[in-house]
Amino acid sequence: MIAVNKPSGWLSIPDRHDEEIPSVRTWLEKSYPHIFIIHRIDRDTSGLLLFAKNEQSHKYFNQLFEQRAVKKIYHGLAAGAVVQDAGTIDQPVEQHTSMPGRMRIGRNGKSSVTHFKVMERLKGFTWMEFDLETGRTHQIRVHMKHLEHPLVCDSLYGSADPLLLSTFKKKFKLSKEAESEKPLLGRLALHASSIQLKGMDGQPLKLEAPLSKDLDVALIQLRKFAKR
């Protein structure tokens, strides 16, 4: 197995129509010509992505995901103050009929279950942990929109506005050298943090991907200037 900490903006596998968009599989194939993707994460999401080195391991790990024998933990920054300390969102998710590329809550959708826990409350934001029971496209993003607390910098289900230090730091001043403020975060505030499963030898295995630098820096600044 190969575990990769995928950058936000990269695809899991190549785009069929635009080869210019970077993908993890294309990058890996330079060193591993014969690899198989085990699961996918959204292009805008950073974090843990798994590949198999051969067909045997690919079949084994694929079955674990299909049987929901895998614990997948994500962390994300939500807009606003989430009141509940913990809870479960059990709402079916389906493709949006009039907006291609988007998903929505719908009675005809596939069963989708997200368990969430508040990790930290900040002024205007909530740092959260998500435990996915299912793995639908955009599941966390759609469920957080349903809670009316979309993820920060979510152009599809919330606001695409970047996270700026000036929005929460009192007496913020732009440096003389800067023409404009550089965003702390300009991409979806969601990270695939860890996966727990059984290895092919039957032993429990936990894989973790550290937070990307941009998300880590954003949290440091929020804790410094937006502490509740």
Image (spheres, rainbow, N blue to C red):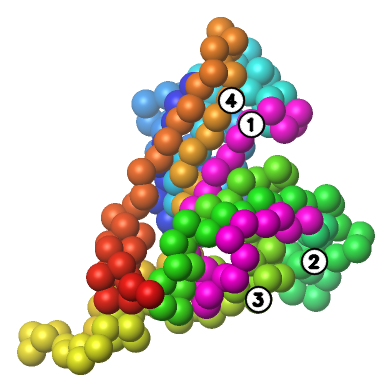
Element on which disc 1 rests: loop
Instruction: Residue 40: tell me if it is visible.
Output: yes
Q: Quadrant of residue 220?
A: bottom left
Q: What residue sits right under mark 1 in the picture?
A: 70
Q: Which residue is mark 2?
A: 105
The amino acid on which the numbered mark 3 sits, given as a three-letter code, is Glu
Q: Position of residue 81 (x, y in %)?
A: 53, 75
The residue carrying mark 3 is 148
Q: What amino acid type is highlighted by mark number 1? A: Val
Which residue occupies the extreme left position in the image?
176
First reached walking from the N terminus: tag 4 or tag 2: 2
- Displayed quadrant of residue 167: bottom left
* Residue 46, x across and y down, in percent: 45, 51
- Kindly indicate whether the residue at mark 1 contacts the one at mark 4 (C-beta within 8 angstroms): yes
- Distance from label 1 to label 3 (Cα)? 28 Å
The residue carrying mark 4 is 197
Answer with mark 3 or mark 2, whichever residue precedes in sequence. 2
Front residue of 82 and 68: 82
**Distance between mark 4 and mark 2 Cα atoms:** 29 Å
Tell me if I can see residue 23 in this picture. no
